[in-house]
Structure formats: structure tokens, C-alpha cells
Image (cartoon, rainbow, N blue to C red):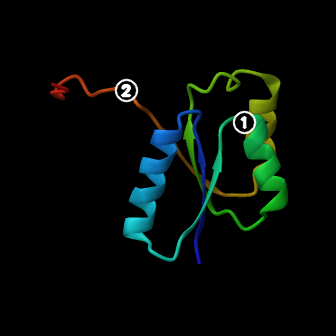
Amino acid sequence: MTSFLIIDDHPLFREALGNAVCSALPDAVIFEAMSIDEALQVLASEPGIELALLDLSLPDATRPSSRSARSTCRFRKAARASRRTAPNCNTD
């Protein structure tokens, strides 16, 4: 069973990413964190997390704890999540 950690401060974005993961991998286990500090707590308590989906624009992403997160994470893969709109995307 694959475990994911979604790190984003916006609850709807976390939910959307979780739904996308679960639709592709119905047996996936999803953990969520709203900040880097919370992500570190989840990682400390859940050593089986294999992939993190990370919003790099988190308010605490530039603090020393974010560097600590990168150096202490147990997962080997991470993906950057962004809410930015593509230049050619029609949002109307």
C-alpha cells in the first residue's frame, strides 16, 4: 500500500490532490499537513510515507524548519504542487 503526504495550507487544494491520488490509486493512504512543521510531525509518526506533494509557497517554507524537513524526510520522492494558473489557461 502506497502512502502519500500532502502538504498545503489550503484545505480544498489538499482535498483535490487527495481525491486525484485516490482515484488513480484506490488503496493509497493519504496523510495531510498544513505546514512544514506539521509535516515533520506526521513524518515522525508515520515512517511509511513514500511520496510527498508539497506546496512550495507555504508561509513557513523559508524558515529553518523547511530545510530541516528536506534533510530529515524519510520519503525518497517529492513533487511540487502549485496553484498558479498556466498562462494559456482560460479561468473564466
Q: In the figure, 13 relative to 77: above or below?
A: above
Q: Residue 40 in the image: x percent, y percent?
A: 79, 45
| Mark 2 or mark 1, earlier in chain | 1
- For residue 74, the mark is none
Q: How many marks?
A: 2
Q: Quadrant of the C terminus?
A: top left
Q: In the figure, 30 relative to 82: above or below?
A: below
Query: Within 10 Å of the Cα at label 2, are there few (<14), some (14-19), or many (20+) other Cα atoms?
Result: few
Residue at x 46%, y 40% (from the top left corner): 13
The residue that disc 1 covers is 36
Q: In the figure, 59 relative to 40: above or below?
A: above
Q: Residue 26 in the image: x percent, y percent?
A: 45, 74
The amino acid marked with disc number 1 is Ile
On screen, residue 6 versus residue 89, left or right, reads: right
The residue that disc 2 covers is 84
On screen, residue 18 versus residue 3, left or right, reads: left
Residue at x 73%, y 44% (from the top left corner): 39
Decide which of 65, 34 is in the foreground and name it.
Answer: 34
The amino acid marked with disc number 2 is Arg
Are the residues at dot 2 and dot 1 in contact (C-beta closer than 8 Å)?
no
Query: Within 10 Å of the Cα at label 1, are there few (<14), some (14-19), or many (20+) other Cα atoms?
Result: many
Question: Residue 57 appears in which quarter of the rendering?
Answer: top right
Q: Secondary structure at mark 2?
A: loop
Q: CA distance from mark 2 to mark 1?
A: 20 Å
Q: Secondary structure at mark 1?
A: helix
Q: Residue 67 in the image: x percent, y percent?
A: 76, 32
Q: Quadrant of the N terminus?
A: bottom right
Residue at x 42%, y 58% (from the top left corner): 19
Residue at x 72%, y 36% (from the top left corner): 36
Decide which of 12, 24 is in the foreground and name it.
Answer: 12
